[in-house]
Image (spheres, rainbow, N blue to C red):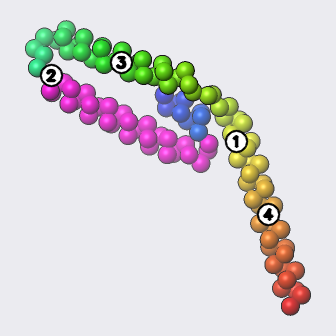
Amino acid sequence: TGLEFSYSQAPSNMKAVLQAGWLLTVAVGNIIVLIVAGASKLSEQWAEYVLFAALLLAVCIIFAIMAYFYTYIDPNEIEAQLDEEEKKKVKNDLNVDESQAEVGTQL
């Protein structure tokens, strides 16, 4: 779900970077689980379950705060904006090329 959300909110030229970032955070999360599980001196299985449930609750609160302040971006709007900027750039490049050709013919 998180990967799909971030992928839909990114411009097309950043989708690969977001996927790499997502996989990196998954790896870091797995390392955190290994560290917490290894460092905890809990002999009972239920106590370790309660520990991870409490950590999950803390993360859910952090994500709820982040979601409250998030502004949703329509992916189609992003693509339209990028296409418009690209068309302007191509038009400017053509104008520069034409200007250079005119200067070259005048010389």
Q: Amino acid at mark 1?
A: Glu
Q: Give the alpha-carbon distance from disc 3 to disc 2, as whole Å.
A: 18 Å
Q: Picture quarter containing residue 80? A: top right
| Region rendered in magenta | 11-40
Residue plotted at (42% across, 22% down): 62
Check disc 2 and report the residue beneath it: 40
Q: Give the alpha-carbon distance from disc 4 to disc 2, as whole Å.
A: 62 Å
Contact between marks 3 and 4 (CB within 8 A): the answer is no
Q: Secondary structure at mark 2?
A: loop
Check disc 1 and report the residue beneath it: 79
**Is residue 45 at all visible to an observer of this figure?**
yes
Q: Amino acid at mark 3?
A: Ala
Instruction: State the predominant SS element of the stretch in magenta.
Output: helix
Circle 1: is it few (<14), some (14-19), or many (20+) Cα within 10 Å? some
In the drawing, what numbered circle is on residue 22?
A: none
Check disc 4 and report the residue beneath it: 92
Check disc 3 and report the residue beneath it: 58
Measured as percent of width and height from the top left, residue 51 is found at: 24, 15
Circle 3: is it few (<14), some (14-19), or many (20+) Cα within 10 Å? few
